[in-house]
DNA sequence: TGAAATTGTTTAACTAGGTAAATAAAAAGA
DNA sequence: TCTTTTTATTTACCTAGTTAAACAATTTCA
């Protein structure tokens, strides 16, 4: 077994766990934050736009958006096409956003602080190249 | 949000999905294969040794080993310390092993075929450095 | 020695990914 | 037009990770 893969998976779990630690004080999980971040950047989106952007299957997004709705951070409304549901941030989410963003930025900086800017670019390049 | 993290998570999901595709013909999932591989390499191990090695929590291993036992690929027997259970491969697992290993090796080679040996080492180095 | 602390495993309940199949609305075509 | 196909979402069920808490066996130590 190529040790690169083992290391990659280890690193993934480490990152996700630390990310969830960071989000804990806001009562959020990483996948919830990912959706909030996307909606903040792009504005209201349909579920399909979300899962296509994130490269994840539809049921995953249905579930996480439902959870965010229960938390009062997101609203769903019917689109012109009555099949689709448009998801948007609530005022509470918009108010919460900068606090979480700040924590996340600090976290991300800490995570890559051992790498120079050049090394970060190299890592991104190698990851992208791997996929083909 | 540092795009490095987004890319990293995308790449992770891509890898796991392709890995599970590869294992599908054997009726296995990636975490099951990981444990089989470890036992093949190290010989019989206690549950605690397994989860410490894999850097995962104990209940995850309890569950996956139970599944492997049901599949007839693994046996659990009491250790000298009667709290611990020693997990070992069954003859069926030992017979199955080289076939799966072969598929996995082909898969792994394909996944990194865009990278030179040097780039692979660099990637491993950068991943390790990231964690700190 | 016997009480307290630690260790190994398990159970329960949560998030987060996947596939398969159902349903309703819209679009396409004969 | 109306039947068929496609699209958007959801439901159900699987693997796989997490934490918290329970339990039994072992170790520690007063």
Image (cartoon, coloured by chain):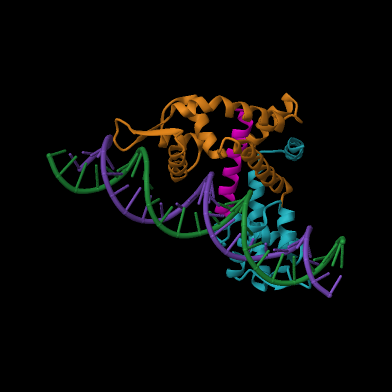
Chain colours: A cyan, B orange, C green, D purple
Q: Is residue A75 above or below residue D28?
A: below
Q: Position of residue B19 (x, y in %)?
A: 63, 38
Q: Nearer the viewer, residue A25 or A87?
A: A87
Q: How many marks?
A: 0
Q: Position of residue B9 (x, y in %)?
A: 67, 46
The reply to whether the magenta stretch includes residue A16 is yes
Quarter-wise, where is residue B77 in the image? top left
Residue B132 is at least partly visible in this image? no
Query: Which quadrant does the N terminus of chain A fall into?
Result: top right
The answer to whether residue B89 is left or right of residue A102 is left
Q: Position of residue B130 (x, y in %)?
A: 64, 38
Residue A50 visible at all: yes
Q: Position of residue A117 (x, y in %)?
A: 75, 40
In the image, what residue occupies the spot 62% across and 34% down?
A: A5
Q: Nearer the viewer, residue A63 or D21?
A: A63
- Left or right of C21 in this view: B35: left
Magenta segment includes B20? no
- Can you say which quadrant of the picture contains the C terminus of chain A? top right
> In the rendered image, which quarter is residue B120 located in?
top right
Q: Which secondary structure is most common in the magenta stretch?
A: helix
| Res C24 → quadrant | bottom right
Range of the magenta residues? A1-22
């Amino acid at each position: 077994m190529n040790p690169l893969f083992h290391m990659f998976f280890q690193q993934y779990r480490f990152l996700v766990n630390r990310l969830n630690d960071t989000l804990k004080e806001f009562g959020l999980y990483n996948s919830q934050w990912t959706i909030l971040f996307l909606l903040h950047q792009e504005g209201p989106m349909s579920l399909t736009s979300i899962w296509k952007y994130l490269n994840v299957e539809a049921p995953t997004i249905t579930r996480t958006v439902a959870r965010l709705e229960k938390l009062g951070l997101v609203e769903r409304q019917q689109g012109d096409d009555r099949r689709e549901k448009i998801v948007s941030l609530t005022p509470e989410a918009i108010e919460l956003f900068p606090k979480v963003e700040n924590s996340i930025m600090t976290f991300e900086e800490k995570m890559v602080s051992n790498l120079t800017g050049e090394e970060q670019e190299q890592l991104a390049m190698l990851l992208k190249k791997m996929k083909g």
